[in-house]
Image (spheres, grey):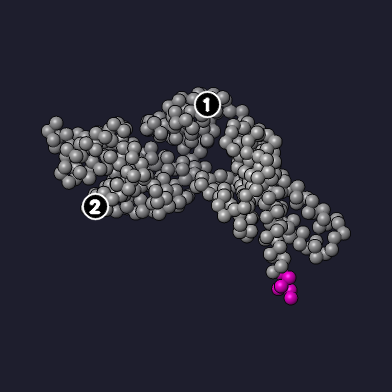
Amino acid sequence: MLFFYYLIFLFFFTVVLRPFSTLIHELGHGIPALLLTDKKVTLYLGSYGDPKESFKFTIGRLELFFNKKPFHWKIGLCVLEKQTLSINKQIFIDLMGPLASLALSLVLSYFVFFSGLNDNVKIILFFFNVSTYYDFFINIVPSSKPIELHDGTTVYNDGRQILNLLKFKNLPVEYNIAGKHYNNQEYSKAAASLEIVFEKGYQKDFVYQLLISSYLQIKDYTNASRVDNLYSRKFKKTFNSNDYSNSGLIKSFSDNYDEAIKDYDKAIEIDPSNSTALNNRGYTYNLMEDYENAVKDFEKAISLEDSFAYALNNRGFAKIKLGLKEDGLADLEKSMTLDGTNSYCYLNFGVYHYDNGKYEKALEYFTKAQELDATTYKLDSYLKNVKEKLSL
C-alpha cells in the first residue's frame, strides 16, 4: 500500500506540480515581455523551442506550446519575436523568471510551515517547495554550461544571460554599431568600430572575441594575430573552446602548424563536440600532409554535423591524397551540393584533376576558386604549378 501511495505521489509531482512550476517560471518571463513589447511572445513547456508534438494555445499575443508528453514538462523556453530591446528591459525580462519561481517558493513555504493544512498535503507541498527553490537557484546562479535549443543554437541560463547583459551596460555607442555591422556581414566596418572601442579603454573579453572574429571573417590574419596575442595575455586562463579554436586558425594560416594543433587539442579537450575545431585541426593536418589523422578528425566532425560542407570538402581532399580518389571525389561533390560558393571546394576539385594529369581542367577549377576568393589559402601556389605544367 505504501508503494502504491508513493507511485501516486510521484505521478502527481511529475505530471502536475513540476509542470506548474515550469509554467510559472516561463510566465515570469513572458508576462513582462508582453508588457514591454508590442509583438508576439511564445512559451514552450516540455521543449527548448520545438513546436512539433505539442498542443498549441493562443491568448492574444501570447502563444503557448505544451509538449504532448507531460514527463518532459520539467523544461521550458520563452521566445520573443525578433525586435530591439534596451539592455535594461532584457535584464528585467530575464530576471523575472527566477523571481517568479522564488515568489512561488515563498507562497509554498507559508502553507508548509504556517498554515493549518492536513499533514499529508503539507508533505506534498514540502517536496514541491524544495523543487521550486531548486528551480530558482539553478536559474539565478550563472552557469557556464550552454543549453542547446531545438534549432541547434545555444543559450545560457538566466543568471549567465543577466551577467552577460550587465557587461554590455555603459559600453560606448561604437560597440552597438559594430554589432550591427557584424550582423550585416560588414566585417571590415565592424572591426573599425571595435578598434575605436579599444581606444576608449573598453577592453572586455567579449570585445576581443568579436574583433578577432571580424578579422578572421575578412582573412586579415595579421591583425587577428595581433588582437589574439593581446587577448591571450589578458584572458588566457578563461579561454573557452571557441577561443582556442580561433587562436589555432590564426596560427594555421600563419604556417605555425604545430602551435595551431596544440590550440585545437585544447579546444577539443574543453568541448569534444566542437565540430569547427575538429574540422580546423583536420585541415591543419592536411597542410602538414598527415592525411590519416586528418580523415579521423573530419569523420568526427561529420558525425556531429552530417551536412558540414567544409568538413566533407576537406575529407575529400585528404582521401584524394591517400589514393582514395573516387571516395574523395564523392565527398567533394556532396560538399558542392551543400555549398556551391566555397572556393576551397573548387580548389580541391582542381587538385583532383591536377593529380590525375588533367591540367587544363585543374586550371579551370583553380580559376573559379580565384574568382570566388582570391585569398584562398595556397591557391597562388597551385595556380603557379598548373601554369608551369601548361607552359603558360
Q: Quadrant of the N terminus?
A: bottom right
Residue 209 place in picture, x, y as percent: 48, 36
Secondary element under disc 1, as helix, strand or loop, is helix
Q: Amino acid at mark 2?
A: Glu
Q: Are marks 1 and 2 in contact (CB under 8 Å)?
A: no
Q: Quadrant of the C terminus?
A: top left
Judged by its main secondary structure, the magenta piece is helix
Between 373 and 273, the residue placed more toward the observer is 373
Q: Which residues are magenta?
A: 1-6
- As drawn, 377 above or below 199: below
Q: Is residue 4 magenta?
A: yes
Q: Which residue: 36% across, 53% down?
A: 299
Q: Which mark is drawn over residue 208?
A: none
Q: Is residue 381 left or right of residue 59?
A: left
Q: Which residue: 82% across, 55% down?
A: 111
User: Marks 1 and 2: which is nearer the front?
Assistant: 2
Q: Is residue 84 left or right of residue 180?
A: right
Is residue 319 in view?
A: no
> Badge 1, how many Cα within 10 Å: few under 14, some, many 20+?
some
Q: Which residue is mark 2?
A: 326
Q: Is residue 284 left or right of residue 90?
A: left
Q: Which residue is mark 1?
A: 177
Residue 386 place in picture, x, y as percent: 18, 37
Secondary element under disc 2, as helix, strand or loop, is helix
Q: Residue furthest right?
A: 116
